[in-house]
Image (cartoon, coloured by chain):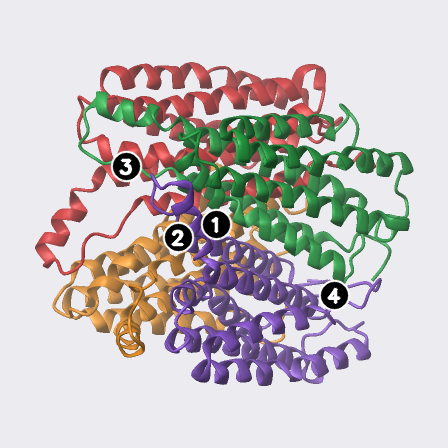
Chain colours: A purple, B green, C red, D orange
Amino acid sequence: MNDVKETGRIEAFSDGVFAVAITLLVLAFLPPPPYLTDNALLQILLSRWPELLAFVTSFATIGIMWINHHRLFTVITRLDNALLGLNLLLLLLIVFVPFPTALVAQYVVYPTQHVAAILFSGVYLLLATVFNLLWHYAAYENRLLSRKVNIETVRSITRQYRFGPLLYLITFTLAWIYTPASLVLNLLLAIFFALPCYPRRQAV
Amino acid sequence: MNDVKETGRIEAFSDGVFAVAITLLVLAFLPPPPYLTDNALLQILLSRWPELLAFVTSFATIGIMWINHHRLFTVITRLDNALLGLNLLLLLLIVFVPFPTALVAQYVVYPTQHVAAILFSGVYLLLATVFNLLWHYAAYENRLLSRKVNIETVRSITRQYRFGPLLYLITFTLAWIYTPASLVLNLLLAIFFALPCYPRRQAV
Amino acid sequence: MNDVKETGRIEAFSDGVFAVAITLLVLAFLPPPPYLTDNALLQILLSRWPELLAFVTSFATIGIMWINHHRLFTVITRLDNALLGLNLLLLLLIVFVPFPTALVAQYVVYPTQHVAAILFSGVYLLLATVFNLLWHYAAYENRLLSRKVNIETVRSITRQYRFGPLLYLITFTLAWIYTPASLVLNLLLAIFFALPCYPRRQAV
Amino acid sequence: MNDVKETGRIEAFSDGVFAVAITLLVLAFLPPPPYLTDNALLQILLSRWPELLAFVTSFATIGIMWINHHRLFTVITRLDNALLGLNLLLLLLIVFVPFPTALVAQYVVYPTQHVAAILFSGVYLLLATVFNLLWHYAAYENRLLSRKVNIETVRSITRQYRFGPLLYLITFTLAWIYTPASLVLNLLLAIFFALPCYPRRQAV
């Protein structure tokens, strides 16, 4: 095999898993019972704002993680066993996301309940950690990076990723204290991490 | 990265999301109870015409939106943060479509009920709006368009897209007045928007 | 756009829809109630042979249809509005398949019941018809075929496809008379249509 | 068609099926009832360790099988009828995996129950067997292998695959005797098979 990208099919498979996982999030919205009056239906739909919040949070987070995965694999162009294993571990966590999402949607209305939010933010903490492991494994002495990679790009990714696990550790800790704050911070984090990914007008 | 398409993997991911979302629509069809006689089963299936109408409407609309997404990304060949964000927002709405579809299927038999149809057509109104935002963002001063793009193609897309939000605003308004009319217009719109996308025999 | 394949993304999207639809078939297998003894569980699983038969039939049929779709699009390399519309119609029917599959699994144990089997075989009849329409539309005066297409390949596809709708009309008719015969013939048809698709050792 | 890979679209379709099947595994996690106290919710979640074990086992196994599929198709570059049929049979088994997974999750807490574990390990035994059939069919006298294939790669795959069915036969036999041992061995096998797939730093 020549010097070109070895990672085409791992990206295609990962894209498929991301796409299915992000789309399955909608299954958390069970249709309300039939035969309701307009008023009753409206009440039920409005009372579901926590489900909507959890859905938007998870969608944004998985979306951002896909963007980050995409970004890493423009720089990572070679494979080995450990990378395949770390990528599978990452996908396992992504695939698991709809379960804590459905759970947190059920329990977030009780700010004094913590178990659901702890599981939810715990999964995101693990996700941020595995992302860092995967990146550091691939970038260590340019092990699996493209031979033409820009050193500045590698450094900027390393710099940005340093804070991921720390920030998600804060949302995880908040989940033990005050659930809504944890969920809102999770959403803010997703938006924040989306921002510096692609410098405007620069190729990816 | 050279001057060629930067958007390959964003298209692959979006294709995956469109494909899953359009296929999940079938989950709205729950199997009827077992042990029915032929007559009873036939009655139940025939009474489900609203589910079928909602399914066909959503399938056609998501299908048309995929065609339009495909069309835009033959012209859009570069990426930046805002485009990735707008594309994710578009996919979030696409992914959400099965929920109002299932809802409208439950409630469309009551023409005096409006909440389900308002949500349903509201989502399509948002979809048409985000499509316009994405296109105008990318096309503004050819920001993210291919450098070899045909100026006439850009103008024809801009012209066609101008009316999308307006027409879906009409279906949204109709949903407050007479539900069935809104749903039928939604279906007609999908068919209408499918037509001028690809001039016959012309490359896409 | 040059003379090369225009159909890459329509194939990617269709592959996604086929892949999701064929995988969703497994959702027809609801887990049995918990807390059963080994004997009771075994009885329940064995009593589910009709579900398994319907699953295998649908899986084989969708699989064969994917093979046929794949085959057509090695010859069809250009697009127009009508082809996109026909392809969407084909995918709509593919996506609908899990519903009649779940239905027929519930009712096939009653050979005197016909409604489920009629719907099931009716969908396959429509599928075979749309496949023929799509092929004849694309092949008429080589409208959308590759300019380097082998005339013998075109003729052999046309010849093979001629009998599809007729044979599925027979399974449809059988469904009105004797349900199990219709389902078994459907399975045989899937196997039969798989055979001549790829002459052994010849490129596709 | 030239001498290049004929198998691009079969890989894309298979990737899609693998991606959907591995993601649907999460549907085995039904959300617990709402309105529980933190303690009650925690108890329920902790009591679900068998579901988690089954989920991780199946995810790892499907993931490893994808890696193996990927590996085979870097060497297999041509198609014929039988290969398409064997690949469909393989995908049918992959797609079926979520059902025995959900089943084993329900029954694994009763070590004296065997039916669920027998079905579960039986499916994996069939999977290992079909993988071997597919490989031996393609590799027999280099029937469908790339003309530039390394003879050492072919031999190492053949050697590694020889033990798959035997080892899964042991997990199948254990399921008749002591269910938990079978499930744990299944997990160990998945990890073991992952290891030698890609010699470190070597192209795939």
Number of the front mark, 4 or 2: 2
Dot 2 and dot 1 residues touching (CB under 8 Å):
yes
Provide the residue designation for mark 2. D94
Number of the front mark, 4 or 3: 3
Dot 2 and dot 3 residues touching (CB under 8 Å):
no
Q: Are marks 4 and 1 on the same chain?
A: no
- Left/right of residue B84 with respect to residue C178 in the rendered view: right
Provide the residue designation for mark 3. C53
Can residue C133 be seen from the camera position used here? yes
- Left/right of residue C150 with respect to residue C127 in the rendered view: right
Relative height, residue B109 to residue A135 (above, below): above
Quadrant the C terminus of chain B occupies = top right
Q: Are marks 2 and 1 on the same chain?
A: yes
Provide the residue designation for mark 1. D17
Chain that bears disc 2 = D
Q: Are marks 4 and 3 on the same chain?
A: no
What's the distance in space between the residues labelled 2 and 3, CA to CA? 17 Å
What's the distance in space between the residues labelled 4 and 1, CA to CA? 29 Å
The residue under the point 40% across, 26% down is B49
Callout 1 amino acid: Val
Provide the residue designation for mark 4. A3
What's the distance in space between the residues labelled 4 and 2, CA to CA? 33 Å
What's the distance in space between the residues labelled 3 and 1, CA to CA? 20 Å
Residue D199 found in image quarter: bottom right
User: Badge 4: how crowded within 10 Å, few (<14), some, or many (20+)?
Assistant: few
